[in-house]
Image (tube, grey):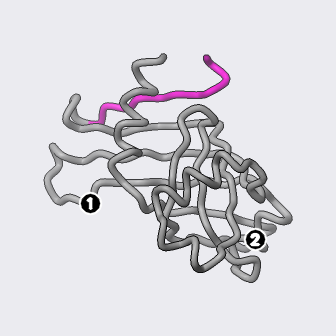
Amino acid sequence: MQKNLEKIVSFLDNHHVMTLATSIYDEVSACSLFYAFDRDELSFIVASSDDTLHINHIKLNPKIAGNILLETQTIGKIKGVQFRGTMSELEDDKLKKIYFTDFPYARALLPKLWQIKVTYFKMTDNKLGFGKKIIFEPSSL
């Protein structure tokens, strides 16, 4: 299982934008967010304003889904990570430091930071074989 996590983290470390999906009742939302990732906490750190649709959603339903992908038209190079988890306001100063290390210019904007605690990863990597999936669930550690 640790080897699967290594492959996922390696991919995440080489990217910086995610698509985040949220929902409440019959309303859905998707947005793009810059992220930092903390392997120890298996958490993404993102910045977003209180007045956005996706934040209004997570205040009522903290369950989220998202993906990060390598954009390519070459089938053999398709690679990406899908994830599920819960999102809440960030309180951990260590994680705040990680975000501002990755995005130092953001500090001047005084953004509100949020934590996405991952409960499930699925990575597709066609370099390992067409449609090859790597599943990792933190509860399996």
SS category of the residue bearing label 2: loop
- Identify the residue position indicated by label 1 in the image: 71
Question: In front here: 16 or 19?
Answer: 16
Left or right: residue 1 compared with residue 11: right
For the residues carrying marks 1 and 2, which lies nearer the camera in this image?
A: 1
Quadrant assignment, res 6 = top left
Q: Amino acid at mark 2?
A: Asp
- Residue sitting at x 77%, y 63%: 58
Would you say 8 lies left or right of 113 here?
left
Compared to residue 137, the image places residue 17 above or below, namely below
How many neighbours does mark 2 have within 10 angstroms: few (below 14), some (14-19), or many (20 or more)? few
Q: Which residues are magenta?
A: 131-141
- Residue at image location 64% in from the left, 48% down from the top: 95
Q: Is residue 48 magenta?
A: no
Classed neighbour count for the residue bearing mark 1: other residues with Cα under 10 Å, few (<14), some (14–19), many (≥20): few
Q: Secondary structure at mark 1?
A: loop
The front one of 103 and 15 is: 103
- The alpha-carbon separation of the residues under discs 1 and 2 comes to 30 Å
Is 118 situated left or right of 4 in this image? right
Looking at the rendered structure, the kind of residue marked 1 is Glu
Would you identify the image quadrant in which residue 46 lies? bottom right
Inspect the magenta stretch and tell me whether residue 137 lies in it. yes
> In which quadrant is the C terminus drawn?
top right
- Lower sequence index among marks 1 and 2: 2
Up-down relation of residue 63 to residue 135 (above or below): below
Residue pointed to by mark 2:
26
Q: Which mark is residue 30?
A: none
